[in-house]
Image (cartoon, helix red, strand yellow):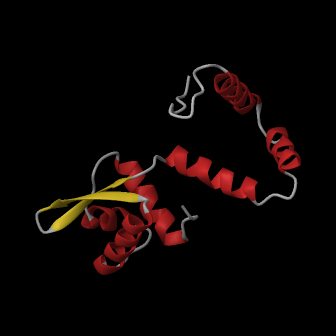
Amino acid sequence: MEQLGDLEAEIMDRVWSARGPVAVRDVRALLAPTRPLAYTTVMTVMDRLFHKGWLTRERAGRSYRYQPALGRSAYTAQLMRSVLSEADDRGLTLLHFVHAMDAAEYETLREAVQWHSSSRGRDDEEPTPS
């Protein structure tokens, strides 16, 4: 999956925040205070997000109800993997990343590495916050 454009990211932010299926009109209303857009613009972008795999949808009468295919944290992890894959020196890049962490973030990372190293860290198992 590729990185989201500005409008795509704004729309995904509203869909993630909704915590349930949303129609185009719902997302348009959520965007309206800061970014008034035509209904057709929001509909087109959401259709593209569906075809790119970012959204799922189900027919609801004459329209669709959309939900995110990935959670916000999974999207962020995907972005991090993408950036890391482009680094000349992945190890050094990771060291800089860890150096910038605060104590709580470092502890979360330590727990994630421990989880990954344990028998629970199988490929078919999703990480969960502790």
Relative side of 82 to 94, left or right: left
Locate residue 64, reporting x and y percent.
Answer: 22, 63
Q: In the image shown, does 105 or 29 lie closer to the viewer?
A: 105
Tell me the quarter of the image containing the N terminus.
bottom right
Q: Tell me the residue at 40%/72% (across/down).
A: 48
Tell me the quarter of the image containing the C terminus.
top right
Q: In the image shown, does 46 or 35 lie closer to the viewer?
A: 46
Q: In the image shown, does 82 or 97 lie closer to the viewer?
A: 82
Locate residue 104, reporting x and y percent.
Answer: 70, 28
Q: Is residue 32 visible?
A: no
Q: Tell me the residue at 54%/44% (across/down).
A: 73
Q: Tell me the residue at 37%/65% (across/down).
A: 50
- Above-or-below relation of 122 to 17: above
Locate residue 122, reporting x and y percent.
Answer: 57, 29
Q: Is residue 122 visible?
A: yes
Q: Tell me the residue at 40%/57% (across/down).
A: 14
Which of the 4 image quarters holds residue 55? bottom left
Which of the 4 image quarters holds residue 85? bottom right
Relative side of 126 to 88, left or right: left
Relative side of 42 to 118, left or right: left
Count of numbered badges drawn on the protein = 0
Locate residue 52, reporting x and y percent.
Answer: 44, 66
Residue sticking out furthest to the left: 61
Residue sticking out furthest to the top: 119
- Above-or-below relation of 85 to 130: below
